[in-house]
Structures are given as C-alpha cells and as structure tokens.
C-alpha cells in the first residue's frame, strides 16, 4: 500500500493541472503532456510526425504498410508516467508487438501485459525479467499457465472457478487478480461481457484463491477500449473499493488495483489529453480509497502506440453504383481483413490524408479490396474525400499503430498480411 493523504494528492492533482494548462496554451494537440517540438506536428499541419513524413517522402510501398515512429511510442509512455506517477505501466503487447516497440519500452522500464506464451517469450527475448510480466488473459490453457510459471511469470488474471483451479495446479502460490465485469459505457471499442465476473463472484473467488494456496493480489477491470468518458474509472473504482472492504472482512487483504487500458488514440473525434485521464483516475482513487492507496497497475495499449503509426495504402478503384449517384465508392488495397478490423460496426473512425487534400470533397463509401461484402470500412458513417482523388494515389491512414498488424489475416484472397516498419 502507498500511504498518501488527500492533501498531497490535491497538490499532485494541482501540479498536473498546471502542466496541462500550460501545454494547452502552447499547443492544440490533444494527447501530449507538453509541447514536444520535433515529435508531433500540430493538428493544423496534419498531425503527421516529421519523422514519418520524412520517411514517407523517400519511401513508397507497393502493398499497404504501417510506419511506426518509436520516438512517439516513447513520448506517449513518458507522458502517461508523468500523468499517473503512482502507477506501474504494463504495456498491453497485443496492441503492437513489434520488436522495436518492445525493445524501446523495455529500455524505459515498462512492464508488460501478455496474453499468450508467444507474447511472454517475446518480452523475455528482449531481456525483460519475468517479474515485469503479467499474464493478463483470463482464458488460458493449463499447459500455457505451466509454461509461463516455468519461465518465472508470477502474476496471473482470472475470472472463473475453472481458471482458478488451473492456476492452483500449475502456478502454485502465484499472485492472482480477479477481473470484474464492466459496463464499458462511453467506449468506442467496448469489451462487453466476455471478460470479468460479477463483484459478488469475485469476492467468493478471491477467498477461494487463498484457500487454494494462491496469493489473492488484487482486482482488475477494463472500462472498454477507446474510452472517452473520464468518469468510467470512478464508476469502476467504487465497485473495487467495496470489494477490497468486503474481502478484508473475510480476512483477505488485497494489495493491488489494475486499471486496465482504455486510454484513447486520436481518431476523428477529439479526445481528452492523457493528463485529464491521470487527474480523473487519481481523483477517483483518492475519493474511494482515502489515505491508503493500494498499488496501481495500468495496462495501456492503444494510447501508447496508436498515434505513433501511419498506414500508407493505395486507391485501387473509384466507382459509382449508378450514373445518377453522387456518392463514390473508394476501394483501397487495405480493408477489414488486412489490418483495419476495428472498423467493424464502423466503431473506430480513422482519419485519412490524401495527395488531393485541400480541394473540393464529396461523400464516399470506403471499402477494402477483398471479395467479402463485409469488407466495407465506412458506409453509414459520413466520410468525404477529395473529388480529385485518383486511382493509384497513395493515401495515409492516421493513428493506426494499435490493433492493425496483429488483426491482419494471413492470406485472405491472396493478400499478404499488413507489413510494418519501425523508424
Ligand atoms: C487485459 C487487457 N489489458 C489491456 C488492454 C489494452 O487496452 P487498450 O488498448 O484500450 O489500452 C486490453 C485490450 O484488449 C486487455 O484485454
């Protein structure tokens, strides 16, 4: 537990507010803690990092390619650490497991949230000690738990009796945390009821964890990815504090709160800066826990790598469905099956840059290149692209560093998986 008091947290919050307001005056960019010359361009100039812009000015790709500026990854990590200094950051490897990203974050001291033995091995291969790795997937094979434990991993998530029994057998004495269900209201990529259990069940399971010889370490939750509502952590933490108290009454002293991910990238809609998330989360921690704050873990994925990446794609076809219709169909060489899976239900709304930007625009449907009719990116959502856009033009899709390469199909329609370079 970290001893604190409302006075010192108020000071902490006031000082972080000051940083934010200075940053807000100096720059209109939404996600940086301080104006970072050379790291990002202001939104008015397209929000493309100078390094990516330089790189793309001398590189062109025949197939879609994600270009990630690892300096922005570092910047986003440091901004989060400044915004939430009491939290230990476990980067969610699934968001983008590129070697250069893991290496840079490892060198900065980040910990890692993993979902499989492959992700664990990746982190270990980069020299990350197993004490800095959590196995955060609540759905694990027995032999994968044993594999992780053999390699020294000791932190495991669970949300069910069956998973707890597997952990007791293959990870004796491990530090286990129970994931509780969340509504995910306000999230553009909600994680629904697939993960977590009701708080009453979490209470029983954590008591049972102790009986099974495990170490009941804490509670985790995820308020939904691309969470735009700052109050959602307050809602979650009110449930978590109650669980801490109820478990104490059962003689189980939890020590950790895992805040999950949820912090946003900048897609079409503006988002709050990371400092607002830090403020809202710390205010909720202090309001609910009072002077004795438990260890805090946060597992960001999207907010660390999303804005660090840009996909270069190509316009394959521009057509209309009738001679009288204004709306053009713009088919790209990238779609739902080659990296842009988060356009499912048109949830994540990416921004596009084209060589014809600045001229007159008209409404479009944007679609991918495969034979599957589900491979439409945006049809209901109103998008406009320049009327001068041509077949063969290279188009940039911004803030695509998270959940793209890993969501890309292997060979659907014979299209190669999304390529990626880190600079
Ligand atoms: C357990 C866990 N932690 C963290 C994350 C990362 O979330 P985000 O990308 O919203 O930060 C996820 C995403 O699915 C997750 O499942």
Image: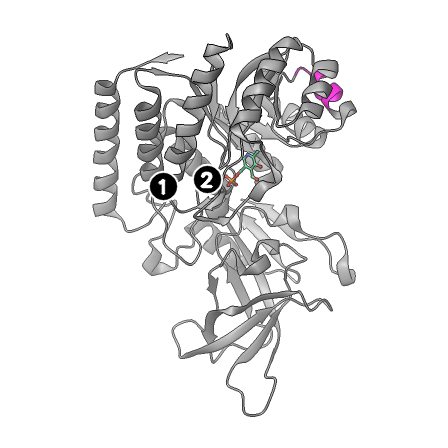
Q: Does dot 1 land on a helix, a strand or a loop?
A: loop
Residue at x 21% of width, y 40% of height: 22
Residue at x 73% of width, y 20% of height: 166
User: Range of the magenta residues?
Assistant: 145-152
Q: Nearer the viewer, residue 234 or 408?
A: 234
- Left or right for 15, reference 81: left
In the image, which disc is placed on residue 385? none
Q: Nearer the viewer, residue 409 or 165?
A: 165
Mark 2 vs 1, N-terminal side: 2
Q: Whereabouts is ligand 1, in terms of quadrant? A: top right
The answer to which image quadrant residue 87 occupies is top left
Q: CA distance from mark 2 to mark 1?
A: 27 Å
Q: Residues within 10 Å of mark 1 (few under 14, many from 20)?
A: some
In the image, which disc is placed on residue 71? 2
Query: Can the viewer see residue 96?
Result: no
Q: Nearer the viewer, residue 100 or 333?
A: 333
């Amino acid at each position: 537990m970290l001893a604190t008091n409302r006075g010192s947290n108020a000071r902490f919050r006031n000082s972080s507010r000051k940083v934010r307001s200075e940053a807000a005056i100096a720059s209109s960019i939404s996600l940086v803690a301080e104006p970072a010359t050379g790291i990002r361009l202001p939104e008015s100039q397209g929000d493309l990092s100078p390094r990516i812009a330089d790189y793309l000015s001398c590189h062109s790709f025949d197939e879609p390619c994600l270009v990630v500026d690892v300096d922005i990854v570092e910047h986003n990590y440091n901004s989060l650490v400044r915004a939430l200094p009491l939290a230990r950051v476990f980067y969610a490897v699934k968001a983008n497991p590129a070697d250069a990203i893991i290496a840079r974050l490892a060198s900065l001291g980040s910990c890692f949230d993993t979902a499989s033995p492959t992700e664990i091995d990746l982190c270990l291969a980069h020299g990350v000690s197993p004490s800095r790795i959590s196995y955060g997937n609540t759905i694990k094979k027995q032999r994968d738990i044993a594999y992780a434990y053999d390699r020294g991993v000791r932190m495991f998530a669970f949300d069910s009796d069956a998973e707890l029994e597997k952990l007791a057998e293959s990870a004796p004495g491990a530090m286990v945390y129970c994931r509780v269900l969340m509504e995910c209201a306000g999230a553009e990529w909600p994680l629904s009821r697939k993960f977590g259990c009701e708080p009453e069940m979490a209470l029983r399971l954590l008591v049972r964890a102790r009986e099974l010889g495990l170490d009941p370490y804490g509670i985790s939750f995820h308020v939904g990815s691309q969470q735009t509502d700052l109050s959602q952590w307050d809602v979650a933490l009110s449930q978590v504090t109650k669980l801490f108290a109820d478990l104490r009454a059962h003689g189980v002293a939890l020590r950790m709160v895992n805040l999950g991910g949820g912090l946003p990238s900048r897609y079409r809609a503006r988002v709050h800066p990371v400092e607002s998330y830090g403020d809202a989360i710390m205010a909720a921690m202090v309001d609910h826990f009072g002077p004795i704050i438990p260890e805090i873990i946060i597992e960001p994925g999207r907010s660390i790598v999303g804005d660090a990446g840009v996909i270069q794609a190509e316009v394959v076809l521009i057509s209309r469905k009738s001679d009288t219709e204004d709306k053009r169909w713009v088919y790209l060489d990238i779609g739902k099956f080659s990296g842009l899976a988060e356009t499912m239900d048109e949830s994540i709304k990416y921004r596009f840059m084209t060589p014809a930007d600045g001229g007159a625009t008209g409404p479009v449907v944007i679609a991918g290149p495969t034979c599957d009719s589900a491979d439409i990116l945006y049809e209901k959502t109103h998008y406009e692209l320049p009327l001068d856009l041509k077949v063969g033009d290279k188009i940039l899709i911004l803030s695509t560093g998270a959940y793209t390469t890993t969501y890309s199909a292997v060979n659907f329609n014979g299209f190669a998986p999304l390529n990626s370079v880190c600079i």
